[in-house]
Image (cartoon, rainbow, N blue to C red):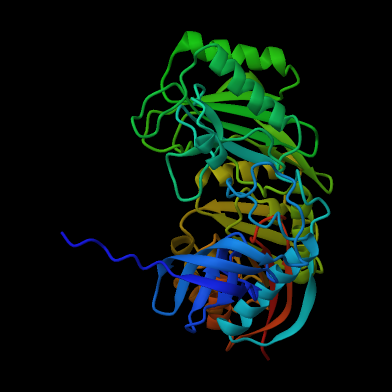
Amino acid sequence: MARRKNTKKTFENVEVLDAGSKGKGIGKASDGRVLIIDQVVPGDVVDVTTYKKRKSYYQAKPLRFVELSPKRTEPVCQHFGVCGGCKWQNMAYQHQLFYKEKEVLENLKRIGKIDIVETKPILGSEEIYFYRNKMEFSFSNSRWLTESEISSGIDIQDKNALGFHIPGMWDKILNIEKCHLQEDPSNDIRNKIRDFATENELDFFNPREQTGLLRTLMIRTSSTGEFMILIQFYQENKAKRELLLDYIIQEFPDVTSLQYVINEKGNDTIYDQEVINYFGRDFIYEEMEGLKFKINAKSFYQTNSEQAYELYKITREFADLSGDELVYDLYTGTGTIAQFVAKKAKHVVGIEAIPEAIEDAKANAKLNGIENTSFFAGDMKKIFTAGFIAEHGQPDVIITDPPREGMHKEVVEQILNVRPKRIVYVSCNSATQARDLQLMDAHYQVEKSQAVDMFPQTHHVENVVCLRLRE
């Protein structure tokens, strides 16, 4: 067999010109190809080595930093560079915002080919660390060893990990000592559970062999001070399960909800699993502008609670409701936006594919005494039809907040058939948002656009646009 030719190339003194897709740096190779570079900041000058070649670009990693960018800042996390969760911790926050907004506007103009009447400045997050209300960690009995651990030559006995997947490696877990994404008691909970489980010889999961007891840990917190802990076990062992759960109650007696799942499947998702309540309530409360929301283990809720409030205020402002409008809230989730705008609307109709989310939406509306909402479960392109509209009324305003892949073409076509006066499109992926806006451009003018940063230290960003029917 012929040996594969080594195609790695080295380029020296490459200036990082921009931040591109997935937060990677963009430079230019001496042969004219684009360089997509890991772990750099715009303004850095680096020597790089390539590890993947395509027709018009290379993917590369830095070998040596010749000059450091003034846009840099010192990462606060000890795991930065190995853990893939906060790839922009080395870039000062004001520059993160600049590149997020730039990407959104470039996508709208390049992919959507649309004119925007007014572009409002990106809204940054007041909290840039410890802002997440939900974190999920994985157990492993063969943790990822860092380069320094490997080069030390020390025989490492403790291979247990409770932390995050190494990017691109489904079976490798980095042990996390301190994460800067979720406020306490999150770090304390994770570290004490890991230490107790190790000391008491509770087996950590091995995803390759599908063996072990402890599989995942989920921690949910809320702005009300309540918190939920959910342990996912790979198999039932009543004595060991209760040993750990009783320890958690003893160590964290203020826990609002302690739950567990026995999941013997090949994947970690709990949405098709029975969640069993062990201690306290089976939900926690979140509050926003006087509204209360029950959050259970399977609930979808924006992971940055404080910034979600700002996002929803912009959505309501863009909807420009007077109190007489029938509003449709597509992809309503647990009905958070629907209930948030309900007091300024005549009626709000929410549609969502996940039945459990719709049950949550109905329960939350009842909890909040909101009587001018209706919620329906079903595949969007199948339920959002002419017959549905004939039954429930012609919307004056449509709010849509689809998943990352955007709206199905048939849903866009149906919106164009309905012709509401205004559309407010909330998106976590400005590329698919731009594609959908282009499909509506002949009939709708993009009146306003505003990016909202929900995820500091990452390249992710939300965007809200207001569309008005062309006359």
Lateral position of residue 80 relative to residue 158, left or right: right
Q: Is residue 460 left or right of residue 241?
A: right
Which residue sits at x=48%, y=67%? 59
Q: Nearer the viewer, residue 443 or 404?
A: 404
Say above or below: 444 vs 345.
below
x and y, in percent, of residue 314 in the image: 78, 65
Left or right of 215? Residue 373 is right
Give the x, y percent position of residue 343. 80, 56
Q: Position of residue 356 (x, y in %)?
A: 53, 42
User: Where, quadrant-wise, is the C terminus in this rendering?
Assistant: bottom right
| Nearer the observer, 72 or 316 | 72
Instruction: Specify the farthest residue to the top.
Output: 239
**Looking at the rendering, which quadrant does residue 445 occupy?**
bottom right
Q: Nearer the viewer, residue 109 or 49?
A: 49
Is residue 335 in view?
Answer: yes
Q: Residue at x 54, y 59 (%)?
A: 403
Which residue is depicted at the point 48% across and 80% down? Answer: 33
Give me the residue at 74% from left, 29% from top: 185
